[in-house]
Amino acid sequence: MLGSKSDLWLNELGIYTLDDLRKAGAITTYIKLKQRHAKISLNLLYAMVAALEGRDWRDVAANDKGKLLMTLEAHQDFELLLYEEE
């Protein structure tokens, strides 16, 4: 699906196909992978979105970076709120 190392990381989460990734969501998957592998860069997020949309990851990074970063931040803020409520 992506590079061999990225595929191994995705497989750790039970993601083997683009359909699996689509169901899990690129942002949620990136957050889970970042928790397991701190050195993962945003390029993986761009690559996952690109794979789902049939685009080059550099196009996603250049054109959708701001939107993706805001969505990522909102997701992380929401997870913090849920954690604080527990």
Image (spheres, rainbow, N blue to C red):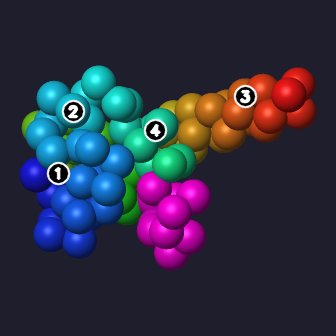
Local SS, label 3: helix
Which stretch appears magenta? 33-42
Q: Which residue is mark 2?
A: 20
Give the foreground label among 1 and 3.
3
Q: Residue at x 32, y 56 (%)?
A: 12
Q: Which mark is residue 56?
A: 1
Q: Are marks 4 and 1 in contact (CB under 8 Å)?
A: no
Give the foreground label among 3 and 2.
2
Q: In the shown orientation, is residue 3 left or right of residue 28?
A: left
Q: Residues within 10 Å of mark 3 (few under 14, many from 20)?
A: few
Q: Amino acid at mark 1?
A: Asp
- Spatial CA distance of label 4 from label 1 is 17 Å
Give the foreground label among 4 and 1.
4
- Is residue 70 visible in the rendered image? The answer is no
- Spatial CA distance of label 1 from label 3 is 29 Å
Q: Residue at x 15, y 69 (%)?
A: 4
Q: In the rendered structure, which disc, 4 or 2, sits on the residue that comes first in sequence?
A: 2
Q: Residues within 10 Å of mark 2 (few under 14, many from 20)?
A: few
Local SS, label 2: helix
Q: Which residue is mark 4?
A: 27
Q: In the rendered structure, which disc, 1 or 2, sits on the residue that comes first in sequence?
A: 2
Q: Are marks 3 and 2 in contact (CB under 8 Å)?
A: no
Q: Are marks 4 and 3 in contact (CB under 8 Å)?
A: no
Q: Are marks 1 and 3 in contact (CB under 8 Å)?
A: no
Q: Which residue is mark 3?
A: 78
Give the foreground label among 1 and 2.
2
